[in-house]
Image (cartoon, rainbow, N blue to C red):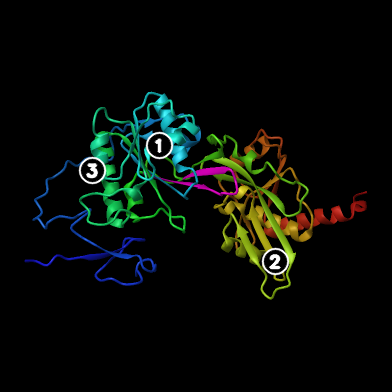
Amino acid sequence: MVKPKTQFVCQNCGTVHNRWAGKCDGCGEWNTIVEEDPMGGIGGGPGKVPKKGRAVALTTLSGETEEAPRIHTGISELDRATGGGFVRGSAVLIGGDPGIGKSTLLMQAAAALSRRGHRIIYVSGEEAVAQVRLRAQRLGAADTDVLLAAETNVEDILATIGEGKRPDLVIIDSIQTLWSDTADSAPGTVTQVRTGVQAMIRYAKQTGAAMVLVGHVTKEGQIAGPRVVEHMVDAVLYFEGDRGHHYRILRTVKNRFGPTDEIGVFEMSDIGLREVTNPSELFLGERNAKSPGAAVFAGMEGTRPVLVEVQALVAPTSLGTPRRAVVGWDSSRLAMILAVLEAHCGVRLGQHDVYLNVAGGYRISEPAADLAIASALVSSLAGSALPADCAYFGEISLSGAVRPVSKTAQRLKEAEKLGFSSAMLPASSAELPKSSNGRWIEIEDLPDLVSRIAGSAARFANPQEDD
């Protein structure tokens, strides 16, 4: 009799080991390797001889194409993030921190779709039916025809949603609670998660029902489970936010049927999530225009322009090594800006602590914020407030040059709409709006920016010189 083989799988990254070890060679985590049965899960079987494959028809790239049919939820911010609504037969994975509002968002979406006449099934693996009903009553969704079930077994879920009329949307909350009889391992393990997700995706592709899967996240902010799950689904969305602020951002990181850089902005309230149609007003709501070290950055999130305030504080230090604290931006990018300021502009910050914060808990990821960051740093060091009606954007290179960025016209139009009459932007920027009443200040390099801010600070300190 052949001795059954066993394998050891890391529950963090999915790396397969021949023997147990305390530390995973793939991700470096400790005590994450668990023994699992290779006969269960994907690719598992009693060792049958593979059958001969059949040839499939080949075609060319040219030919008629059909736009993927979508299910519009009526929640404009959710439809924006998904590229126009849920695509029929697709699988969407939504991840986020515990308590951030994933279940609230999906319950509101399910209720909105049910009111539009769609058949919606909500399967909860973490809460009882009574708990889900309490949330629905709080959100005003108890009067809808959303079908509810509390189950974690994959086979039972498929048998339940397969009865009667095909559902338009199925919500599984969450994938870490699923377990299948075909996989000989505990719920939440790599094999169980992979098996459950594959079964749900197979059902979605065969029936044409849209499938939404909720995933837990790790302490690093990544969706827990094997990375192959993100490759299997059609779209991956992250629900982000800071517990200290009311806003929430639904960010798209993968979408086979739409753009991957769109965001949807919501505000958490007592009765659920409220759409924020103008995020710039949210991030600029409590702005102090007379404070030094504050600059308004005109950024882009996909096709949406967003204006956000960047705050910098430069103070003398009594420590041997000055502090560098960053919230909402890349700390390595800040170190580069400080080095360029010192090397090309003579701005000495080696004996100063530097604190940088993006207001509202927002996080900036594009390099176009370099010019706004540099302006805020120099303004704080000089002790002079920047013009309250000026927005900033532009990328700074290691040579000190200010490089142009994309979508200049959209940034300037959004700034004008919010009352900003001027903007500092790269000198070689294209797509400047022709019919505009704004005053655009073109910056060629970083020394030009520093001289302008220092000159305005000198005029502010000696107003008699202007007479």
* Neighbours of disc 3 within 10 Å: few (<14), some (14-19), many (20+): some
Instruction: State the extent of the magenta-drawn residues as a range.
Output: 235-251
Find the distance from the CA under tag 1 to the CA under tag 3. Answer: 23 Å
Q: Where is residue 152 in the image (x, y as percent from the top left)?
A: 30, 45
Asked whether disc 1 touches disc 3, contact meaning CB atoms under 8 Å apart, the reply is no
Magenta stretch, main secondary structure class = strand
- Residue beneath disc 2: 353
The answer to whether residue 125 is left or right of residue 19 is right
Q: Is residue 39 visible?
A: yes
Disc ID at residue 326: none
Q: Earlier in the sequence, mark 1 or mark 3?
A: 1
In this figure, which residue is indicated by the disc labeled 3?
Answer: 155
Between disc 3 and disc 2, whose residue precedes? 3
Please tell me whether residue 69 is drawn above or below residue 349 in the rendered image.
above
Q: How far apart, in angstroms, are the residues tagged by discs 3 and 2?
A: 58 Å
Q: Is mark 2 on a helix, strand or loop?
A: strand
Left or right: 25 as drawn, with respect to 394:
left
Quadrant of the frame with the N terminus: bottom left
For the residue pair 219 and 401, the one nearer the viewer reads as: 219
At x 65%, y 64%, the residue is: 338
Amino acid type indicated by mark 3: Glu
Instruction: Say which of marks 1 and 3 sits in front.
Output: 1
Residue on which the image places disc 1: 130
Which type of secondary structure does the marked residue at label 3 adopt? Answer: helix
Residue kind at label 1, given as amino acid type: Ala
Q: Tag 2: Cα neighbours inside 10 Å, few (<14), some, or many (≥20)?
A: some
Q: Look at the picture and state if 375 lies above or below 153.
A: below
